[in-house]
Amino acid sequence: MELFAVVCIETSHYVAFVKCCIGADAPWCFFDSMADRKGERNGYNIPAVTPCPEALEWLSKDTKEIIAAKERGDIPEKVPPLTGRMDICCMYQNLDMTMIQINHLNVTCASRNLVVITCTACE
């Protein structure tokens, strides 16, 4: 299993570290849902995506180590500090076989180019 994203959430503010390609040395980017704001009371948030090469070393560790480092506040300096205050969800992928079940639909990714959807209610 390969870590491909870490989503960090605090109330309605979420950020994510997302792997940009496949492989251990792939670069990471940082998404912030509230990076900027336009207007005051009736305004809206402006999200932003930026490169985050610092995430590569931090997120190449074991999941338990990532969570323990976050709880200790031991996050690399250049990783946005708000990440340490948020709850995190680590997302993994298996490039050989991925299956998701939503209601009666099975979504199977047999390869990077093939997605198979079957209905269990029809079987």
Image (tube, helix red, strand yellow):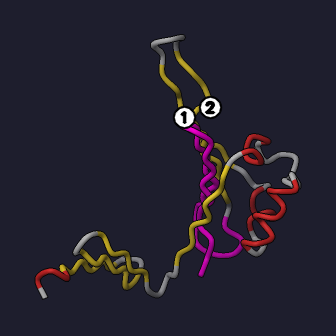
Residue at label 2?
Answer: 35
Camera-side residue of 47 and 26:
47
> Looking at the image, how many numbered discs can be counted on the residues?
2
Q: Residue at x 81, y 56 (%)?
A: 71
For the residue marked with disc 2, what is the amino acid?
Ala
Residue 19 image point, x, y percent: 61, 62
Start-end of magenta stretch = 1-26
Per the image, label 1 sits on a secondary structure element best described as strand
> Is residue 74 located in the magenta-colored stretch of the structure?
no
Quadrant including the C terminus? bottom left
Q: Residues within 10 Å of mark 1 (few under 14, many from 20)?
A: some
Residue 7 image point, x, y percent: 60, 54
Q: Would residue 83 appear left or right of 90 to someone viewing this image?
A: right
Q: Residue at x 27, y 80 (%)?
A: 116
- Image disc number at residue 47: 1
CB within 8 Å, label 2 to label 1? yes
